Image (cartoon, rainbow, N blue to C red):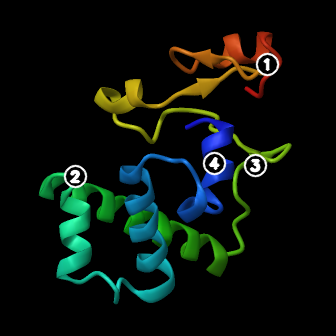
Amino acid sequence: MTEEMIQQALDFRNSDLPDRIKIALELAEDFILNHANNVDDAFMDRLKEHYTEDQIVEITIGIGIWDSVHKFNNVFDVPPPVEDGLFVLERLADAPEDMQHLITHLDGNGNPMDRWEPAEAEAAGGAS
């Protein structure tokens, strides 16, 4: 995701984001704010225009996991890993080895890095 996409997500219904992103954001919003009570057959039909059933399951699991992590952190007053308004991922230890290629890391100058290497990030001005 780009910074522009993140900004558009704040008002996704009126954005020029692709329809498949908008429907996923609508699912996330309803899941979190309304316990998915508006996910009826018509909504599922709209989701299926853009995603397979397996993808819908994966998206919903992801929403549920991150919603739970957010609530857990709130209960225990765990601050998010944010520096200068940006999320910071310091290591890949929690990501399975075969999925690490799916994570994009930025160096200290905001340039994408192929793989998280603390020494490279530190040299580029990022956190180690």
State the SS at label 1. loop
Q: Earlier in the sequence, mark 4 or mark 3?
A: 4
- Badge 4 density bin: few <14, some 14–19, many ≥20, Cα 10 Å: few
Rendered-image quadrant of the N terminus? top right
Rendered-image quadrant of the C terminus? top right
Q: Position of residue 96 (x, y in %)?
A: 34, 36
Q: CA distance from mark 1 to mark 2?
A: 35 Å
- Badge 1 density bin: few <14, some 14–19, many ≥20, Cα 10 Å: few
Residue linked to disc 1: 109
Q: CA distance from mark 3 to mark 1?
A: 16 Å
Which residue lies at the image location 34% right of the left edge and 28% below the top edge?
97
Residue linked to disc 3: 82
Q: Earlier in the sequence, mark 4 or mark 2?
A: 4
Residue 51 — which label?
A: 2
Q: Amino acid at mark 4?
A: Ile
Residue linked to disc 4: 6
Which residue lies at the image location 55% right of the left edge and 48% below the top edge?
16
Q: CA distance from mark 4 to mark 3?
A: 15 Å
Q: Earlier in the sequence, mark 3 or mark 1?
A: 3
